[in-house]
Amino acid sequence: MADPRGGARVDPSPFLVWSLGMTAPSSSAPEAIAGVLVTWRRLLMVAGPEARRYRRAVALFSLAAVAQGLALCCLFPLFEALLAGPPAWGSVALWLAIMLGAAAADLVFSWHGHAFEYDGTIADVTHALRLDLGERLRRMPMEILARHRTGDVSTTLGSHIDEAVVPMGTLSQVMIRTVGVPLTVIGVTAFISPGLALALALILPLAVPIYRHQRRASARERREGAAAHARTESDLIEYTQGLAVLRAVSQTGRQAGRLRESLAALRRVQTEALLASLAPALLMSGLMELGLLAVLGLGVLWVSNGSLALSALAALLIIVMRLGEPLALFSELTKTFDLMEAALERLEALRSVPSLPLLPAAPRVPDAPAVSFEHVSFTYAGTETPALRDVSFRLAPRTLTALVGPSGSGKSTVARLLLRHADPQAGVISLQGQDIRTLAPETLMRQLSVVFQDVHLFNESILENIRMGRPDADDAAVLDAARAAHCLDFINRLPQGIHTPVGDIGGSLSGGERQRLSIARAILKDAPLVLLDEPTAALDTESERVVQSAIDALVQDRTVIVIAHRLSTVVAADTLLVFDQGRIVEQGSHGALLAEGGAYAALWRAQDGLKAWHA
């Protein structure tokens, strides 16, 4: 197989394909070959810059397997010399020396092959792979990334990388030895007794159906076990989080019964998995015993008719017993191999997600609007209803524009596309006259400051959380931004002031305080375009007043887009864009739209009536 980075072609033999059965059981040799090639390609993929060293390790393991096979084959002439009457001690010494030399070569080749694991290369591979995946995640379309649960992504970057990389050296050696040693022995035995070589060649592949059954059982166990664990964890979280409510309504016992059912189902799945894994292990052990008996029976028959020497039979019995060791070890490592393949699949799936394309830069258009959408249409993956339909608008610099409309009308999609979480299927989005697809992600983000309702604070100090808006800012600039966002009143009450770690007090910060930190971050960034997902919507009156003052400091002399949930907060906007079912149905000032008596006026009356009802 050709390595993607270049290099020698490695063609697995048909016996290797048949014996290892790396893919799901298949009656087709081409499918099995394809499975081996896929696994080999994935291993080279995760090896990354160290792929050359991994190929070297595989080559050394192959030489070690041949050396061990030759060492075992030395038993034929060694036993012949020993059982000669009188023993030929000179030949005994010669073949013993050759056998020891082959065994030493096996040890040396294996030692240098395992250097891939023991000299820090494995750690280098996992480190490089995590950096590579981290960079890919940074450039992955947010629309695609949002489909993955945070826990799934973190697990892939953590345990899945270890499951794919850490065992690759050991498993490669075991697989190569499982195939390489028998092939070497069969090849040498063919010169001594073609009949016995044929018997060995027929006996060893009998392990294939057992191994494939074991793979099926292991895959089923993994699927059912994962489902049972997920169900139990979900029920456990639901029970513990709702315990206060359950106690209040005297339903703790009823819900505990549901949790007990989940635990019982998990126990049943684990018991069945243990039983399912026991049968193949016993069958594999039995196969080795049957193989030994078959060789013994045939050997006795051929010795009795003079077609096989007794010394050759004695050597062959020892060899057959030794051949069972790597086969049994490989059988025991089936679950590890399955975990490695599953992790490789997940890593490949994550790596295969294409980054958003970067188009060639175009000349800046003079006197261009700050933001423009030209006939933009967009449909989320997995849905049929367009989120935006032929949307066009232009925003002049240093103006305030509000996006209003019912839930699901397309307001948030406009923000996501402007942030380039995804690209529209049709139309062009421009920022200051430049198609955002021509801007590198870092360049685009330097033009935008974003404040959403849900504020994420990192496990750093208050100072560093604000400094993320502009990493090269000095402490004085950070303090100025915090002062402008009205943060100093609560920061000064913290145990270590602005140096207090958020992890120590994150739960005690109010929604308004968290919003002000987010606004301070945006003020420090000093981007020309500000995008607000109305941050005051979920705040009480006092917090809203303070946060609104911070927002006023943020939006001065900037182009501002507000996703408005409460129309009363955007009556002073220069322009209101009214969305409905993915289209702009109206646009204009608050007064003009009320006078038209259309969709905006209906929304205004509905919210005004709701406020009157609450009053």
Image: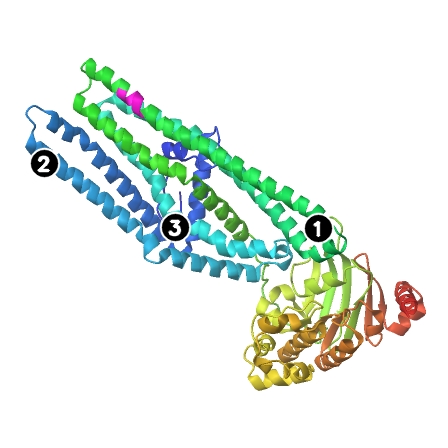
Sequence-wise first label, 3 or 2: 3
- Comparing 250 with 317, the one in front is 250
Of marks 1 and 2, which one's residue comes earlier in the chain? 2
Residue depicted at x 27% and y 49%? 111
Q: Nearer the viewer, mark 1 or mark 2?
A: 1
Disc 3 marks which residue?
6
Nearest-to-viewer mark from 3 and 2: 2
Q: Are marks 1 and 3 in contact (CB under 8 Å)?
A: no
Q: Is residue 379 above or below residue 27?
A: below
Magenta range: 292-296
Measured from the top left, where is residue 340 in percent x and y?
A: 46, 46
Residue 470 image-quadrant placement: bottom right
Is residue 248 positioned above or below 483 on the image?
above
Q: Give the percent coordinates (x, y) of residue 540.
A: 78, 73
Q: Which mark is residue 252?
A: 1
Helix, strand or loop for the magenta stretch, by majority = helix
Amino acid beneath label 3: Gly
Badge 3: how crowded within 10 Å, few (<14), some, or many (20+)?
A: few
Please state the horizontal and vertical placement of residue 511, each as a whole percent of the image: 71, 72
Amino acid at the residue labelled 2: Ala
Residue holding disc 2: 93
- Residue at 90% x, 74% y is 591
Circle 1: element type:
helix
